[in-house]
Amino acid sequence: MKQGNWVWWLLLAVIGVIVVVSVAAPKPRDTAITLSDFAAALDARQIERLELTNTGGVVELHGNYKGGTGDRAGRAFETRTLPTDPIINIDNLNAKVERVTITGVSRFNWLSVLSTLLTVALIGVLLVYLLRGNRGGGGADAAGNFGKSRAHMLAEGSIKLSFADVAGCDEAKTDLQEVVEFLRSPERFHSLGARIPHGILLVGPPGSGKTLLAKAVAGEARVPYFSISGSDFVEMFVGVGAARVRDLFDQAKKAAPCIVFIDEIDAVGRKRGLNFNGGNDEREQTLNQLLVEMDGFESKHDIIVLAATNRPDVLDAALLRPGRFDRQVVVDAPDVRGREHILKIHARKKPLDPTVNLGLVAKRTAGMVGADLENLLNEAALLTAREGRKKIAMRDLDEAADRVLMGPERKTLVIPEQDKKVTAYHEVGHALVAQLLPHADRVHKLTVVPRGGAAGNTAPTPEDRMHYTREILEDTIAVALAGQAA
Ligand code: ADP
């Protein structure tokens, strides 16, 4: 049974028992009377028999009225008072009541004891469960140990990814191929006395496939893979981050050769000593510990640390020194061929219409990274499913690209005819000039359908360029102004 399941069943059972107990528990009976009624009856000597029970905090009084006292004759009553109340002074009672008995111990109420026990047990179980959930899948053994790393470990062979699943970043793959070779047969490198980099920094915008590459390296090399995010190290308490780093590397050493992947390393690896208010001790300690660990593993520990960031400029210089992250691999946004390749990889499990031309989609999506393209295909599949069709068509991909870039169509927005006309003139202005000027990007689509905040759109097919010449910039400005001019 899954761990979560039995906890829920237990919770349900305990709630059930508590409900039953509270329903079955003795309710205040109609024999209860107020203390002043009791005092009055006592003074009038109308009480025949009285039993005092000390339950700890209060004294319970159970008794009977005498016969011949009106409609209450012979009836039982009960009330309670504090042990210090002078009314229950034993001489006073003996003087006014015929028979007084005192029972010191409270009657055993198994219902209340049971419900207390169950509540305690429930809290205990929940506490253990929550603490266990916290420590992540790092294989830590004591429940809720704070200094344990929260790394996720994927055992060797459980990663099915290979370099073939990563498209577009061929240079990065070539650079990482060496790491794969090393992890596969470290002896070959050791015998030559070669020093393999301990750490490699993957630099690139979010969603460009850094995590994917790190996993692919582990998959190719068939070694275990530990992944953790830089922000997982940072806790409120000083020293916890450092302890987690230590624990992570202890685990990694046991599993070596292996890969440790630290996502968002900038969360811990920022330049130290930039804070004037005494600095962030916790983060500095964590970073120091990371540096110590990276220096510390000798060649017998075949651990390679891959770290990802999109801000290499904010990293502490000490992290980038030889023996630490001394290599950088750039994982950039893909070019048009890369985008087509990525689209093909993610379209493998999606049925496409013969009308679909992924090359064209790639051309229209300049600037998108792998994660965006994956999202685009998913949006297209959702659109297709919504219309009950079996295959994704080109228009679904077009629509999905517009959605991803500009937001969904605003179908319910009512637009006056005049406004539509103005928008149409505006968009045609962009398109006409774009088509006429030699350096402007070609246009593949015009629309007067409002999306997100835009009334219409002229979608260019931009080229991937490294540099912009004066002509290109001038023509681009002309296209931008042409809408207004029209
Ligand atoms: P990062 O770590 O750079 O932020 P990820 O590796 O988490 O990005 O990428 C997110 C998702 O985008 C991946 O799971 C993958 O499906 C897709 N993706 C990104 N880049 C590529 C690529 N080059 N080839 C194939 N899929 C990619």
Image (cartoon, rainbow, N blue to C red):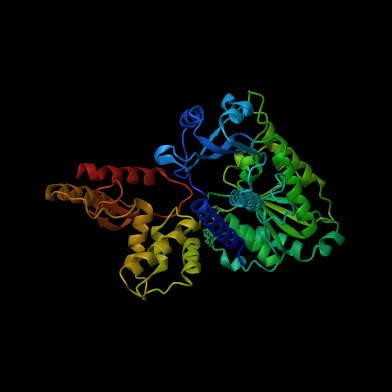
Q: Is residue 471 left or right of residue 260?
A: left
- Percent position (x, y) of residue 95? 59, 28
Where 69 sits versus 424, above or below?
A: above
Q: Quadrant of residue 251?
A: bottom right
- Which of the pair 123/389 is nearer the observer? 123
- Percent position (x, y) of residue 423? 20, 48
Is residue 260 visible to us here? yes
> Tag count in the figure?
0
- Which of the pair 142/97 is nearer the observer? 97
Q: Quadrant of residue 359?
A: bottom left
Quarter of the rendering occupied by the N terminus: bottom right
- Percent position (x, y) of residue 408? 32, 54
Residue at 67% across / 37% down in the picture?
Answer: 316
- Which of the pair 126/403 is nearer the observer? 126
State ligand 1's quadrant: bottom right
Residue at 87% across / 61% down in the picture?
Answer: 191
- Which of the pair 446/455 is nearer the observer? 455
Where 476 sits versus 193, above or below?
A: above
Where 376 sits versus 328, above or below?
A: below
Where 316 sits versus 458, above or below?
A: above
Q: Is residue 326 left or right of residue 101?
A: right
Q: Is residue 477 left or right of residue 302?
A: left
